[in-house]
Each structure stands twice: as C-alpha cells, then as structure tokens.
Amino acid sequence: MASLTDLSLKYRIFMRTYRYRQTDWSPGAVLRKPLARARVAVVTTAGYSLPEQSPFNDSIPGGDYSYRVIPDGSDLNSLRIGNRSDAFDSSGIEADKNLALPLDRLHDLARTRQIGSVAPRHFSFMGSITAPGRLVSRTAPEVAAMLREDEVDAVLLTPV
Amino acid sequence: MCHQSVGLIQGVIEKGGIPTVSITLLREVTERVAPPRALFVNRPLGFPLGEAHNAPLQEAIILAALEMLSIELRGPALREFPEFKRL
C-alpha cells in the first residue's frame, strides 16, 4: 500500500506542505487510432542510465533535470539506477528493470498485436527534482520534440 | 518527488500533442499535480508495474493504462487498477 501515511515522517511533512507544481496541458490530446496500430514510448523517472552515459548527479541543488535517451533494444540489465532516494524501495527495479522501463513487455505486446509498435527511443529522468523550473522549460520540451520526431502515438510514464 | 516530475513531464508531452498516461503509486500527490491521465496502482513506491519478473501482471497494468488514452479529456482522468483496489 503506497500512501502518504506509509512514508517516513520527514517525507510526509514535506509532501503535505510542499506546493506542487502543475502544468497547463488543456485541452489534452487523444489517441485516435486503435492501440493495435499505435507506436508506444516510455518515459520513466527511475534515473536509469546506460554504462556509456554519464550518471545522474544527485548533488545538483533542486535536482538533476537532465535526461538520458534509452534506445530501444538496449540491454536492460546493463542500466544503472541513478535514483537513490531513500523514499522508495529500489529492490524491485534492481531485480527487474522492466518494472519501470517495460521494453520487454512492450515488445511482447507488439508481437501479440495488442500495440502497434515500440518507439525507437525511450527517456529516463531522475525523479527527485524539488525545483522543476528547468525541467518544465527546457528538458521536458526537448523530449516532447524527440517523441514527435519519432512519430510516437502514445506515451506511458512511470515514477518509482 | 518522482510523481511531480512525472506529472510535469507528462503535461509538457501532452501539450505537445501526444496523448499520455502515467502510473501513480501516490494517489494524493497525483491528485494535486493533476496530469492528464493516471492509473493508480496500489503498490509500494518503487513498484510501478506491480512486481519484478511478473510479466502477466506488468502487461495487464500497461494495457489498463494505455486503454485510458482514448479518453476525451474534460479534466484530469484518474482510474484505479482494479486488481489492487483498496478495501
């Protein structure tokens, strides 16, 4: 059961008093084709990076707002986990990277024609960002542009 | 803060014209961040698709989330993954 009452006191106090930011996304988009023909991409905040990429930097004040491109077909077992927040139990994503970046699952769903195809690029952010200004103004728009370049129809996002 | 980051990135992608859906493990936070579509999975933080190495469960959660993409939004849409419903 994940609810605010399960978290340690320090996070509970923070989460109750923090002023959450919202983005204005209205009126919103809608998937106008069957899922069986849609190209799907994943964006996670598990802080995954590939061995050849620089790891996330958890000493940046306000949080590391950068992202890593995870090409489809990457070896999931080689991913490193940058999100070391003690607010969550990382044993699951250490054992199975699909738990947050389900590329093997998407390929299974494409094979059984439940989705159309898997996008060529997926994206990994670090979740622990308390000052999200540059995330919203800079890095998230860059990722949105790459998803449009890849003609992605649908995006699944996962926190940890 | 993962849930706020997810909601903000999601809003930017949705605004850019691609329909989005996120998993949430913290319903209260997602209600405050108000992203376009979210599926509440009643599992601990760190387990967005339910369980490690449980492919059928992971696929069921992914499909339940992706099915929300055909919702024409009038406001934020939040559903709960039925197998983990809170009693």
Image (tube, coloured by chain):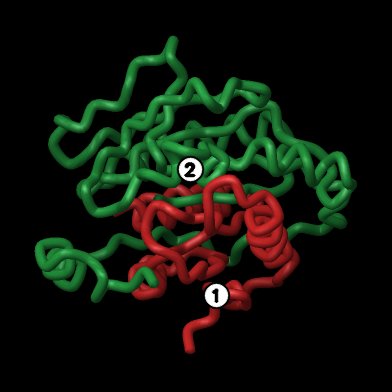
| A45 to the left or right of B60 | left
Front one among A74 and A61: A74
Q: Is residue B54 above or below residue A106?
A: below
Q: Give residue B1's position: percent from left, percent from top.
A: 28, 54
Check disc 1: other Cα within 10 Å, few if <14, some if 14-19, many if 20+: few
Q: Give residue A64's position: percent from left, percent from top.
A: 26, 33
User: Which numbered circle lies on residue A44?
Assistant: 2
Q: Which residue is mark 1?
A: B84
Check disc 2: other Cα within 10 Å, few if <14, some if 14-19, many if 20+: many
- Which residue, as the protein is rendered here, is positioned at the far top? A52
Front one among B53 and A21: B53
Callout 2: chain:
A
Secondary structure under badge 1? Answer: helix
Q: Which chain is red?
A: B
| A24 to the left or right of A15 | right
Instruction: Inspect the image, locate mark 2, and give the three-letter code of the amino acid beneath it.
Output: Thr
Residue B21 in view of the camera: yes
Residue A29 in view of the camera: no
